[in-house]
Image (tube, helix red, strand yellow):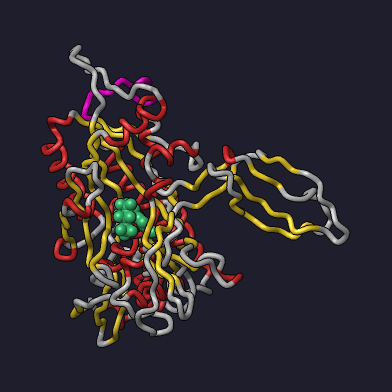
């Protein structure tokens, strides 16, 4: 190997507090996560996943699905529509109560989430005592479904300002869009019927509850059983911040676990330990994880126990996921509002009842920040500082990188391509990398968390062995090509 400097194993791993800047800059530079709509100046609270980010995200989501659905025999997966009948959100209480307290600074007009402010000093203009009383700000994104509008002609030379709005239950107009209609194609204003109103779902849970009866009728599972869903959720956060931690569009992984109420404490405790097993598989250290038992006053009125699983994120200790015993609140709401029975008929012929629910609710973005924080490592190799991602191998976006020692030697390149194709067929997430010298390639792969690099050199042509280099130790060993797949498994 030409890169004798990096042959030496790593020394002095440094326990370092990772900063959010470290993570954000790595993510943007190396193609994990970019600001949303960046080319047009961005859209606050939205993020785009690049090639490595989408792989990391999928690996986390697939691990969750495997752990909580595929590896268990009491779980049923669903993938419900994001757009749902507005009655879902009226019945669940989101229309009336899914709000955050919003305050405005009377001096600079900046708006903030009141419970995220420290003191009464405006973070934008620095004035104190300028906040009015908090207003309830509903975090759901409105949208309209279908061409359910009445329109009439109000043509004018030069066009009209078209306004799209709906009438709310009180008969008041609520504007959705205003557009300039230069060619009078719109035919004046469009008044949307209030039945067209829908929302981008603020949580995946309601798509589970509304399918409870469908799953029971199709599969007739024994209690306890769970229904799991992964998917996008949207919240019009007043102040999105801390990278993807608080976004306006994010991904949730939720289970509604249906139980007999007499078993709730036992089932709740099982969930606490199952969650810890999963978090360990994400590579999160126990020292940075904390269980915050939410006190009665701060819990939703229907919840008998809630634990926020918190993590020491780079910005502060904050909620990673929630676990709540929600009693029969959600199914009873559906039963009362839809008029359809949500009762479960026990197989032993005993009295039917509406099951209670335990809800573990994970956010993918928060898991990603925690995983990157846990993996971000600094050490020294031969006196030189090195940053690398010590990701668990099952989460790494690239499992192994393959390169020829020298790019311009055809025989090395051909052999390396053979090895690359063999590994790619087996593992899928294999990267070809022949840019720069081999030392630089190792550093690049270290930075994105690739657990192994394989280098094809002149010895390979003689004895069919390759150099296998380990990310964490930087140790290099010779392995026969015929044994490489087994070695990497
Ligand atoms: P917070 O108090 O931080 O606003 P929450 O208690 O409202 O969060 P839940 O409604 O319990 O959050 O949502 C379940 C999970 O969804 C959270 O634990 C988190 O992982 C994730 N989540 C919620 N809001 C966001 C967001 N704006 N961005 C990213 N993830 C989120």
Q: Position of residue 335 (x, y in %)?
A: 35, 27
Q: Is residue 483 visible?
A: no
**Which quadrant of the figure has residue 391?**
bottom left
**Location of residue 282 in the rendering, given as x and y in whole percent from the top left corner:** 26, 56
Q: Residue at x 41, y 27 (%)?
A: 338
Q: Which residues are magenta?
A: 214-224
Nearer to us in this view, 285 or 416? 285
- Against 326, residue 295 (above or below) is below
Front residue of 326/379: it is: 326
Q: Quadrant of ligand 1?
A: bottom left
Residue 328, horizontal then vertical, whole percent: 25, 33
Q: Quadrant of residue 122?
A: bottom left
Residue 373 colored in magenta in the image: no
Instruction: From this view, report whether residue 11 is shown above or below residue 428.
Output: below
Name the residue furthest top. 349
**Left/right of residue 405 with respect to residue 147 in the rendered view:** left
Residue name at image x 31 percent, y 81 percent: 4
The relative height of residue 322 versus residue 68 in the rendered view (above or below) is below
Q: Quadrant of the N terminus?
A: bottom left
Q: Position of residue 249 (x, y in %)?
A: 45, 56
- Number of on-image labels: 0
User: Which of the 4 quarters of the picture holds residue 37?
Assistant: bottom right
Q: Nearer the viewer, residue 163 or 278?
A: 163
Does residue 482 sit above or below 466 in this rendering? above
Extreme residue toward the bottom, this view: 383
Q: Is residue 178 left or right of residue 292?
A: right
Residue 223: in magenta span: yes
Residue plotted at (26% across, 60% down): 319
Residue in view at x 28 percent, y 75 percent: 18
């Amino acid at each position: 190997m030409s890169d004798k400097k990096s042959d030496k194993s790593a020394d002095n791993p440094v326990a370092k507090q990772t900063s959010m800047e470290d993570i954000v800059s790595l993510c943007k530079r190396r193609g994990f996560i970019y600001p949303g709509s960046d080319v047009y100046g961005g859209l606050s609270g939205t993020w785009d996943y690049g090639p490595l980010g989408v792989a990391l995200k999928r690996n986390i989501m697939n691990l969750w699905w495997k752990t909580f659905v595929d590896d268990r025999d009491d779980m049923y997966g669903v993938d419900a529509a994001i757009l749902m009948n507005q009655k879902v959100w009226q019945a669940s209480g989101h229309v009336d109560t899914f709000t955050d307290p919003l305050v405005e600074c009377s001096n600079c007009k900046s708006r903030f989430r009141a419970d995220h402010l420290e003191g009464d000093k405006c973070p934008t203009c620095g004035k104190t005592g300028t906040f009015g009383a908090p207003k309830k700000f509903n975090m759901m994104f409105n949208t309209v479904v279908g061409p359910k509008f009445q329109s009439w002609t109000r043509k004018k030379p030069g066009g009209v300002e078209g306004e799209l709005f709906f009438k709310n239950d009180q008969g008041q107009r609520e504007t959705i869009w205003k557009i300039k209609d230069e060619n009078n194609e719109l035919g004046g204003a469009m008044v949307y019927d209030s039945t067209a109103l829908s929302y981008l779902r603020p949580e995946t849970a309601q798509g589970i509850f509304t399918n409870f009866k469908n799953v029971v009728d199709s599969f007739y599972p024994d209690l306890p059983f769970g229904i799991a869903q992964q998917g996008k959720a949207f919240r019009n956060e007043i102040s999105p911040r801390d990278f993807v931690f608080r976004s306006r569009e994010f991904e949730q992984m939720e289970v509604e676990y249906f139980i007999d109420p007499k078993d709730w404490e036992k089932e709740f405790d099982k969930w606490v330990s199952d969650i810890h097993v999963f978090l360990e598989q994400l590579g999160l250290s126990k020292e940075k994880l904390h269980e915050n038992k939410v006190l009665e006053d701060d819990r939703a009125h229907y919840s008998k126990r809630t634990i926020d699983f918190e993590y020491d994120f780079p910005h502060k200790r904050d909620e990673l996921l929630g676990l709540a015993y929600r009693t029969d609140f959600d199914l009873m709401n559906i039963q009362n509002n839809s008029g359809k029975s949500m009762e479960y008929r026990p197989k032993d012929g005993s009295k039917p009842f509406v099951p209670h629910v335990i809800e573990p609710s994970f956010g993918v973005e928060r898991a990603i920040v925690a995983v990157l924080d846990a993996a971000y490592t600094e050490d020294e190799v031969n006196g030189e500082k090195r940053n690398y991602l010590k990701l668990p191998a099952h989460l790494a976006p690239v499992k192994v990188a393959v390169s020829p020692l020298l790019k311009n030697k055809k025989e090395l390149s051909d052999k390396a391509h053979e090895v690359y194709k063999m590994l790619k067929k087996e593992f899928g997430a294999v990267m070809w990398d022949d840019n720069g010298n081999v030392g630089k390639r190792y550093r690049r792969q270290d930075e994105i968390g690739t657990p192994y690099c394989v280098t094809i050199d002149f010895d390979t042509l003689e004895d069919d062995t390759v150099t296998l280099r380990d990310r964490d130790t930087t140790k290099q060993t010779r392995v026969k090509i015929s044994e490489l797949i087994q070695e990497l498994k």
